[in-house]
Image: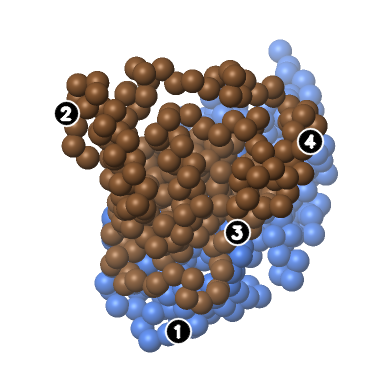
């Protein structure tokens, strides 16, 4: 029996936007989420404020979640992990495990919204010592502190006087195997730099970078204000090594534009870790037989003109499961995927009566 | 240049003194119109004629100041800023910075504070400053004579003999000759004297060249007195 219901896997920004879109169009959205709550990575990693507008993440997520959970056309299944799938466009059967119990769903099309995970700095090929030095942290760790409106040196609990970001950790690196740019880290680091300067006006903040990549309005909304209003220091040159010196960190790198090697003391170093496909994304690619690129992200067909269609008819991929994506990309892709999924199920089963 | 490691070119001073000089630069009313932020595009260096001849970079000036690198700013104030020809080609900066204006401010601070390097840099300009400030006008190209300026080097002889050819190598026609655009009206010269007096230019001259200051004061006081101004320098 053919179905026009749309199954959405993952309750982060991509899945939430998609579920709302499907439901608003009068179709049934079945949203399955492996955690016991919605919001995805921004919720799980406790994002403080969103990039680029510094809107509180909780507030923004609530605005995405409320219309979904309150929508009569949406069915939300928490604690549900998809384990298998069979069938085809218009007639999929998806198997899942829900708190140890096997369940299954019928759907005409599937939207994979399983997102990314943050790069594990233990895999970087410089010598930053994330797992050695307490005061070497990641964007994710910094975000948690910023959420609590308290930014301190983890080793002492005291506010730092000098903080730096090191960009492109886990991205743009052939040795690691991630040649791609993770797209959002420049903006997020700059956003956090602004927040740190707001919290600690006496703290100097540096960003060591290869290229700053803040396209479109991120340039004037984040980059320029960070430099001009908040006096964040951008230094072109990436550090190669962090060593402990006394109770501080010594960051070794090159100040390329002033043509000199540098060894600068820092109280906190924040590694701007990039994006990799989440385990859920890898798993769904396997279950549905979706083509993946060499990095493990789901490959969409159609290049720049179609960012959601996969090699399997009736299965669409949305947002950061297809590659590094910001919220703007993700939400836009969700709308596109909903349109294409509904068009596909309507074609597969022409409306009767 | 910025990273010149030659020793003893100028005296090192305590960090607090460098910081004081930097604060004086930043407190200039023009400062915030001269520097917003720099993303190191290199437009200023690309446009800079001095950068073609010297190891000089307006970008490094903007960077050092934007980063508030007090040590480097002091280094630049003793050296690099004097390589700028103050043509303001760097004003085409897409961020609307003006490294040239930063240099103007830094030079003024260097002069006001009597930095030895400022004195040295300006030494060769004594006669030009005297000429401009006393007459209100400058040496014009047609004044070049083989023996007029021996301190300008042996090539002056060659240039003066072929002045017409040299002029044609420069795109704009100069209107500045001894016959055109030369004479300065009485009203203008009086105004110039008063401006230099009231804006502190004369105090700056005194800081770098007392002899020159004395001669200029003589000339100016006498003339101003003739015109009925009671000005004491």
In three-dimensional space, the C-alpha distance between marks 2 and 4, rounded to whole angstroms, equals 47 Å
Dividing the picture into quadrants, the one containing residue B162 is top right
Which residue is tagged 1?
A244
Work out which residue is located at the far bottom of the displayed protein and give it: A246
* Quadrant into which the N terminus of chain B falls: bottom right
Front in this rendered view, residue B160 or B138:
B160
Residue A139 percent across, percent down from the top left:
48, 61
Kindly indicate whether the residue at mark 3 contacts the one at mark 1 (C-beta within 8 angstroms): no
Instruction: Give the brown chain's letter.
Output: B
In the image, what residue occupies the spot 43% across and 78% down?
A: A249
Which label sits on residue A257? Answer: 3
What residue is pinned by disc 2?
A: B230
Residue A145, horizontal then vertical, whole percent? 35, 61
Which chain letter goes with mark 3? A
Disc 4 packing (10 Å; few <14; some 14–19; many ≥20): few
Q: Whole-Å distance between the Cαs marked 1 and 3?
A: 26 Å
Q: How many residues crowd around disc 1 within 10 Å: few (fewer than 14), some, or many (20 or more)?
A: some
Asked if labels 4 and 3 share a chain, the reply is no
The image shows residue A248, relative to residue B86, as above or below, that is below
């Amino acid at each position: 029996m053919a179905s026009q219901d749309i199954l959405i896997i993952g309750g982060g920004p991509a899945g939430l936007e998609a579920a709302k879109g499907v439901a608003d169009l009068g179709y049934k959205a079945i949203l399955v989420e492996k955690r016991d709550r919605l919001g995805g990575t921004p919720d799980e990693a406790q994002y403080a404020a969103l990039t680029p507008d510094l809107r509180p993440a909780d507030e923004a997520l609530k605005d995405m979640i409320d219309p979904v959970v309150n929508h009569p056309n949406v069915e939300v299944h928490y604690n549900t992990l998809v384990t298998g799938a069979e069938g085809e466009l218009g007639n999929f059967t998806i198997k899942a495990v829900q708190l140890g119990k096997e369940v299954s769903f019928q759907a005409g099309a599937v939207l994979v919204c399983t997102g990314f995970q943050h790069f594990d700095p233990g895999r970087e090929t410089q010598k930053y010592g994330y797992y050695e030095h307490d005061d070497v942290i990641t964007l994710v760790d910094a975000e948690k502190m910023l959420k609590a409106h308290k930014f301190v040196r983890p080793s002492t609990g005291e506010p730092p006087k000098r903080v730096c970001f090191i960009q492109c950790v886990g991205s743009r690196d052939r040795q690691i195997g991630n040649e791609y740019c993770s797209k959002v880290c420049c903006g997020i680091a700059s956003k956090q730099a602004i927040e740190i300067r707001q919290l600690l006006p006496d703290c100097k903040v540096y960003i060591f970078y290869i290229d700053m990549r803040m396209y479109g309005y991120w340039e004037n909304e984040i980059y320029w204000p960070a430099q001009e209003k908040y006096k964040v220091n951008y230094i072109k040159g990436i550090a190669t090594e962090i060593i402990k010196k006394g109770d501080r960190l010594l960051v070794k790198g090159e100040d390329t534009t002033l043509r000199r090697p540098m060894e600068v003391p820092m109280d906190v170093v924040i590694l701007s870790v990039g994006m990799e496909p989440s385990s859920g994304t890898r798993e769904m690619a396997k279950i549905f037989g979706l083509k993946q690129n060499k990095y493990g992200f789901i490959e969409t067909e159609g290049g720049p003109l179609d960012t959601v269609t996969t090699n399997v008819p009736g299965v669409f991929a949305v947002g950061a499961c297809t590659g590094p994506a910001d919220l703007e990309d993700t939400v836009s892709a969700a709308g596109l995927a909903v349109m294409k999924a509904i068009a596909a199920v309507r074609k597969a089963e022409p409306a009767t009566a | 240049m910025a990273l010149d490691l030659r020793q003893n070119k100028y005296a090192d001073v305590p960090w607090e003194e460098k910081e004081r000089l930097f604060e004086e630069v930043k407190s200039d009313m023009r400062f915030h119109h001269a520097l917003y932020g720099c993303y190191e595009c290199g437009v200023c260096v690309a446009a800079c004629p001095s950068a073609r001849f010297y190891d000089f970079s307006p970008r490094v000036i903007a960077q050092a100041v934007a980063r508030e690198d007090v040590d480097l700013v002091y280094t630049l104030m003793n050296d690099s800023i004097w390589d700028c020809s103050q043509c303001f080609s760097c004003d085409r900066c897409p961020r609307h910075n003006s490294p040239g204006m930063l240099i103007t401010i830094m030079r003024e601070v260097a002069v006001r504070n009597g930095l030895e390097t400022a004195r040295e840099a300006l030494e060769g300009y004594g006669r030009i400053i005297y000429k401009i400030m006393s007459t209100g006008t400058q040496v014009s190209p047609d004044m070049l004579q083989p023996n007029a300026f021996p301190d300008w080097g042996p090539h002056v002889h060659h240039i003066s003999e072929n002045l017409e050819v040299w002029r044609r190598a420069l795109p704009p026609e100069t209107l500045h000759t001894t016959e055109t655009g030369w004479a300065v009206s009485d009203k203008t010269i009086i105004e110039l004297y008063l401006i230099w007096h009231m804006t502190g230019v004369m105090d700056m001259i005194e800081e770098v060249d007392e002899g020159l200051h004395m001669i200029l004061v003589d000339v100016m006081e006498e003339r101003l007195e003739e015109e009925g101004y009671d000005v004491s320098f």
